[in-house]
Structure formats: C-alpha cells, structure tokens
C-alpha cells in the first residue's frame, strides 16, 4: 500500500467505513467510483468502465458521473436496491495539499423524500 497515491489511499480509507454502499467520491466536476463499485455501477447503469493509475500494479477500475446529474444516477441505484454514500470535497483544491473530503450523506431507499 506504500505506492498508492494519497488520493486513492484516502478513498480506500473512506470506503472501508462504508463497505455496504456505493461510494461516490467527488473529484472536481465528477463523482467517481473505483474498484468493485465502479464495476457494479458501470454494469447497472450502463456507464463506460475506464481505469485510473493509482500506484498499484494495475489500473483501478473507474467510472464517473457529472456532479450536476448525480441525483438521477443515485435514484437509479436506489431503485436497484443499492445504498449510496456521497463523499464531498470540503476544501478548495490547492497546489500542494490533498483536498479534504468526507461522506456528507448516506442515501437509502428509506431515506429518500420524493418531490411533491
């Protein structure tokens, strides 16, 4: 785990706390999913599965959705029985430090309130 990038190390730490959810991890204008979550989401939502260099021998499977459309994708995942954790950027990107991120919301079918 020594070679893993700081961003990916943080992702894995957060994911370890939310093992039973799809973790949507905010990176700029997108929410990205990695590893098993990326494979699952790409299959369930018919999104393109790509990869990202992260310091491991192989590229990490990755897929993403634009931040402005995240509600549509979350709704589709909830309808398929998944729980979703939203990990937001809590600080502005700087040149020399890791952006602070944390889960701000866990969404399940039981916590969604429909617009009326």
Image: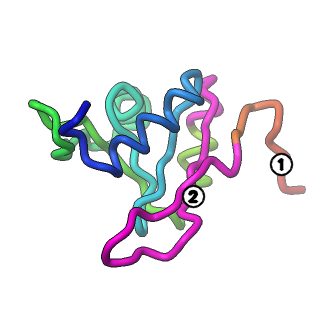
Q: Is residue 93 magenta?
A: yes
- Seen from the viewer's position, the closer of residues 115 and 15 is 15
* Residue depicted at x 62% and y 47%: 103
- Seen from the viewer's position, the closer of residues 56 and 111 is 56
For the N terminus, give its image quadrant. top left
Dot label at residue 88:
2
Is residue 81 shown left or right of residue 55?
Answer: right
Q: Is residue 31 magenta?
A: no
Circles 2, 1 touching at the beta carbon (< 8 Å): no
For the C terminus, give its image quadrant. bottom right
How far from the left and from the top, in percent, is residue 109?
A: 75, 31
How far from the left and from the top, in percent, is residue 14?
A: 52, 38
* Residue depicted at x 53% and y 67%: 68
Q: Which residue is mark 1?
A: 114
How far from the left and from the top, in percent, is residue 38?
A: 35, 34
How far from the left and from the top, in percent, is residue 55?
A: 16, 41
Near mark 2 (Cα within 10 A), the count class, few <14, some 14-19 or many ≥20, is: some
Near mark 1 (Cα within 10 A), the count class, few <14, some 14-19 or many ≥20, is: few
Question: What SS does tag 1 mark?
Answer: loop
- Seen from the viewer's position, the closer of residues 29 and 91 is 91
* Residue depicted at x 41% and y 60%: 27
Looking at marks 2 and 1 on the same chain, the residue that comes earlier in the sequence is marked by 2
Looking at the image, is 73 positioned above or below residue 79? below
Is residue 54 shown left or right of residue 24?
Answer: left
**Quarter assignment of residue 95:** bottom left
* Residue depicted at x 70% and y 47%: 105
Task: Tell which residue pokes out farthest to the front in this image.
Answer: 2
Q: CA distance from mark 2 to mark 1?
A: 22 Å
Residues in magenta, as a range: 77-105
């Amino acid at each position: 785990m020594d070679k893993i990038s700081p961003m990916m190390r943080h992702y894995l730490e957060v994911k370890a706390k939310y093992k039973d959810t799809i973790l949507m991890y905010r990176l700029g204008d997108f929410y990205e999913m990695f590893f098993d979550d990326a494979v699952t989401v790409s299959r369930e939502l018919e999104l393109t599965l790509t990869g990202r260099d992260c310091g491991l021998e192989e590229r990490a499977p990755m897929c993403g959705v634009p931040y402005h459309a995240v509600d549509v994708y979350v709704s589709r995942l909830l309808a398929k029985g998944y729980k979703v954790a939203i990990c937001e950027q809590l600080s502005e990107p700087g040149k020399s430090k890791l952006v602070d991120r944390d889960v701000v919301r866990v969404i399940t079918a039981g916590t969604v309130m429909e617009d009326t």
